[in-house]
Image (cartoon, grey):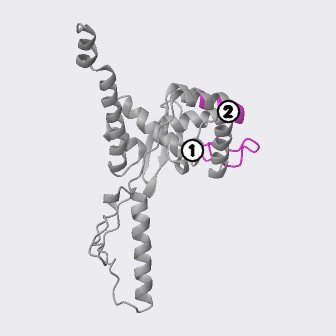
Amino acid sequence: MHFDQSTPSGTSTPALDERGLASHSQHAAARAIKTFCNFCVNEEWIDTSPMKRVRMPRVEEEIHPALEPEEVQKLLDASQNERDKAIILCLLDTGCRANEFLSWTGGDLDVEQGTVKVLGKNRKERLVYLGARSLKQLLRYFIERGRPDPAEPLWVTVRDTSEPMTYNALRLMFRRLSEETGIKDVTPHRFRRTFALWSLRNGMSIYELRKLMGHADLTVLQRYLALVESDLAQAHQRHGAVDNMLRKSQPH
């Protein structure tokens, strides 16, 4: 967003982006100006808002770091029951959104195929997949609570197996695990980010990942891919063949 910010003395102040302000700060400033201009129009001080044709600054969404394998193991070790362990592994193995995950029913799960039918955004169905370790933990959870019937919710409260688990209960479970382990930002969405980054780091294509995660386009996943490519660049700096091996063989 660029404004002609001339001062009475004839000097000008730099545009918001040229001053190094974060995108969120730029958007907040533009929003405040737009609100004030609309107020002036409503009060009939001016006829038209100067902001009417100004494009609002784009907010860059920062991608927070993924969980490390050691952190996931700490969360598993701190879990109080088989259900909590199953939630951690199944969330991490499927990358589902929290509302998708909590809506799983017994009929959505195919243990033999290791698949779960998910109803995503705009009521679009897709399949997500569970690996051997997640399935094994899920069966341990079923031993603890009983195998759900096709119409029954898969995730239920510990006290009452007929009561579906709510988002608030899931959030409180992760808050407790965060406090016990000292790991920050333990949220369902962080598991989704971790699924995406781990999958890309293990060689999954961005197009396969888009289908598994239920994304309509590649915009968000391209930012994840940029992080993975940054990992590769840093790895090359640390272990690049020429710079590291030939340097060791050079005479002092």
- Quadrant for residue 221, please give it: top left
- Marks 2 and 1, the one that precedes in the sequence: 2
Q: Is residue 143 magenta?
A: yes
Toward the viewer: 169 or 111?
A: 169
Numbered disc 1: secondary structure: loop
In the figure, is residue 60 to the left or right of 179? Answer: left
Q: What residue sits right under mark 2 in the picture?
A: 79
Q: Amino acid at mark 2?
A: Ser
Q: Amino acid at mark 1?
A: Thr
Task: State whether residue 233 appears in this view.
Answer: yes
Question: Which secondary structure is most common in the magenta stretch?
Answer: loop
> Furthest-bottom residue in view?
44
Q: Is residue 168 magenta?
A: no
Residue for point 43% across, 32% down: 198
Task: State whether residue 139 appears in this view.
Answer: no
Magenta range is 137-164
Answer above or below: position of 61 versus 10: above
In the figure, is residue 189 to the left or right of 227? Answer: right
Residue for point 51% across, 42% down: 190
Please provide percent x and percent y for residue 2: 28, 67
Quarter of the image with the N terminus is bottom left
Residue for point 46% across, 51% down: 120
Numbered disc 2: secondary structure: loop
In the figure, is residue 237 to the left or right of 191? Answer: left
Quarter of the image with the C terminus is top left
Please provide percent x and percent y for residue 204: 35, 32
Please provide percent x and percent y for residue 230: 33, 35
- Quadrant for residue 178, please give it: top right
- Disc 1 crowd, CA 10 A, few/some/many (<14, 14-19, 20+): some
Q: What residue sits right under mark 1 in the picture?
A: 187
